[in-house]
Amino acid sequence: MSSLFATLHHALLLIIMLMLSSEMLMLKQPFTLESAKKIIRYDAIYGMAAGLILVIGGLRVMYFEKGAYYYMHSAPFFAKMTLFILVGLISIYPTMTFLKWNKLIKQGILPAVTEAQTRALRLIIHVELTLLGLMILCAVLMAKGIGYIGN
């Protein structure tokens, strides 16, 4: 069961990174109703994957792997959780922007998006992807016992 949850956890991280990368690429292309719909769809998948990764990660900490005691004494674990929260907070702006688009798109209206908004959204997504990469580093350190603060 532990291997199944580990695989799901890693697959969800890959899905998150893929959806963010896809959003970023779509924001570089000409903006159309179809591309806006795809970006909204990718962001919804990203959100669902983020929620699932939190649940599965919580189950792994509490019931699988090394146990909650180990993780509660791991500096990389706390760094990883801090990065996860930071990514979540940073993702609020793009998600709120895409949700505003959704209302117009349902009416068949292409949202007015400036070049500055597109650049800002792409920058935020770049930052999110970078922080997710740092989370992977934290996971490796955590798995190797580096930064363990305990007896």
Image: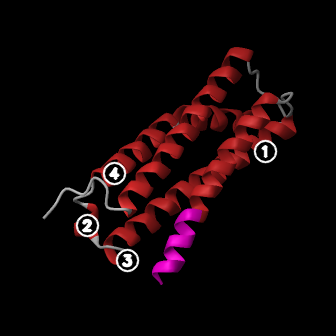
Q: Residue furthest bottom?
A: 1
Q: CA distance from mark 1 to mark 3?
A: 36 Å
> Mark 2 or mark 4: which comes first in sequence?
2
Give, as a single range, the part of the protein colored magenta: 1-10
Give the residue at x 68% y 50%.
Answer: 18
Q: CA distance from mark 2 to mark 3?
A: 11 Å
On screen, residue 119 versus residue 144, left or right, reads right
On screen, residue 66 versus residue 32, left or right, reads left
Q: Is residue 134 above or below residue 57?
A: above
- The overriding secondary structure of the stretch rendered in magenta is helix
Label of residue 64 in the image: 3
Q: Amino acid at mark 1?
A: Lys
Residue linked to disc 2 = 70
Front tag of 3 and 4: 4
Q: CA distance from mark 1 to mark 2?
A: 41 Å
Q: Is residue 138 above or below residue 2?
A: above
Front tag of 1 and 2: 2
Characterize the local packing of mark 4: few (<14), some (14-19) or many (20 or more) Cα atoms within 10 angstroms.
many
Q: Is residue 7 magenta?
A: yes
Q: Secondary structure at mark 3?
A: loop
Residue linked to disc 4 = 76
On screen, residue 69 versus residue 20, left or right, reads left
Relative image position of residue 114 (x, y in whole percent) = 73, 16
> Mark 1 or mark 2: which comes first in sequence?
1
> Mark 3 or mark 4: which comes first in sequence?
3
Position of the C terminus, as image quadrant, is bottom left
Q: Secondary structure at mark 1?
A: helix
Characterize the local packing of mark 1: few (<14), some (14-19) or many (20 or more) Cα atoms within 10 angstroms.
some
Q: CA distance from mark 3 to mark 4?
A: 18 Å
Relative image position of residue 91 (x, y in whole percent) = 53, 38
Give the residue at x 83% y 38%.
Answer: 35
